[in-house]
Image (tube, rainbow, N blue to C red):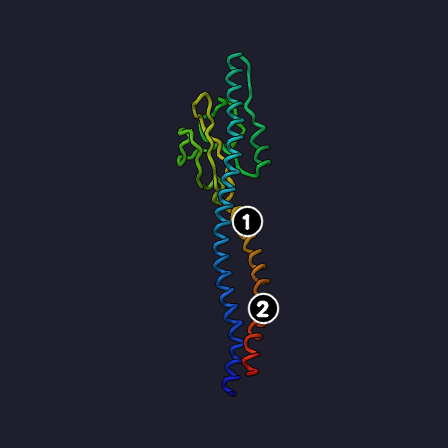
């Protein structure tokens, strides 16, 4: 009987540990899945925002180029919207480049020049890629939106944001998951101790 009582008392400690081990394992698997899903979601949302910004800026410059062509027909001078680049970068928080033929001969376009051989802006399609901008070391996620004038692609607006911005969101999620997991373990430990006591106590009484 004494041996049986010792086993039951030992069981009271082993049951909570076994339950906690199962909870920890399930939590780790769930956290890994949640982080991967969130990373993909953050990546998709970032691309969606970049595409929207690139499309709007490409349309802005396409309209400016069309206006410049119309002014040339009227023998008037139209200047490139040099103010737009810096202001738009401040507004979006992204880097904005122009890759292609200078649409304003003899003038600056107001955008950072870029010459990437890895993108084909003549295709007229929106392209997504990763690259390291000139003078920088970090990898950026970028979208190239063609600037189309009279059904011809003359270049592309490239908007880029650091990939670390996506990782930062993931790290914030991990921190919150860690806090939630720690609180969950405390609650689970108390519950496991209570349940094991309810199971073992009647057996000890017998």
Front residue of this view, candidates 49 and 194:
194
Front residue of this view, candidates 40 and 86:
40
Instruction: Identify whether 136 is placed above or below 124.
Output: below
Give the x, y percent position of residue 160. 50, 38
The disc, 2 or 1, on the residue closer to the chain's N-terminal end is: 1
Distance between mark 2 and mark 1 Cα atoms: 33 Å
Residue at 46 percent across and 29 percent down: it is 146
**In which image quadrant can residue 60 be found?**
top right
Residue at 50 percent across and 82 percent down: it is 7
Label 1 Cα crowd, 10 Å radius (few <14 / some 14-19 / many 20+):
few
**In which image quadrant can residue 175 be found?**
bottom right
Outermost residue on the top side: it is: 74
Give the x, y percent position of residue 120. 40, 32
Front residue of this view, candidates 17 and 68:
17
Helix, strand or loop at label 2? It is helix
Give the x, y percent position of residue 140. 48, 42
Residue 152 in the figure: left or right of residue 17: left
Label 2 Cα crowd, 10 Å radius (few <14 / some 14-19 / many 20+):
some
Quarter the C terminus occupies = bottom right
Q: Nearer the viewer, mark 2 or mark 1?
A: 2
Give the mark count. Answer: 2
Helix, strand or loop at label 1? It is helix
Residue at 59 percent across and 32 percent down: it is 87
Instruction: Identify whether 161 is placed above or below 102.
Output: below
Q: Which mark is residue 169?
A: 1
Residue at 47 percent across and 59 percent down: it is 29
Instruction: Identify whether 127 is placed above or below 195.
Output: above
Q: Which mark is residue 191?
A: 2
Outermost residue on the bottom side: it is: 2
Give the x, y percent position of residue 129. 44, 39
Q: Which mark is residue 19?
A: none
């Amino acid at each position: 009987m004494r041996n049986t009582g010792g086993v039951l008392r030992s069981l009271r400690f082993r049951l909570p540990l076994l339950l906690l081990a199962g909870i920890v394992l399930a939590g780790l698997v769930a956290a890994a899945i949640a982080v991967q899903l969130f990373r993909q979601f953050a990546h998709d949302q970032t691309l969606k925002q970049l595409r929207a910004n690139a499309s709007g800026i490409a349309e802005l410059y396409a309209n400016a180029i069309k206006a410049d062509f119309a002014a040339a027909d009227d023998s008037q001078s139209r200047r490139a919207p040099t103010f737009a680049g810096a202001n738009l970068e401040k507004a979006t928080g992204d880097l904005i480049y122009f890759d292609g033929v200078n649409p304003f001969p003899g003038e600056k376009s107001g955008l950072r020049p870029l010459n990437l051989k890895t993108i084909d802006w003549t295709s007229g399609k929106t392209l997504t890629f990763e690259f390291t901008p000139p003078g920088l070391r970090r990898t950026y996620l970028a979208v190239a939106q063609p600037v189309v004038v009279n059904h011809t692609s003359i270049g592309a607006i490239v908007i880029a944001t650091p990939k670390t911005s996506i990782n930062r969101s993931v790290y914030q999620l991990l921190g919150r998951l860690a806090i939630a997991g720690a609180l969950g373990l405390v609650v689970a430990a108390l519950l496991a101790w209570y349940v094991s006591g309810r199971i073992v106590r009647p057996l000890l009484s017998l």
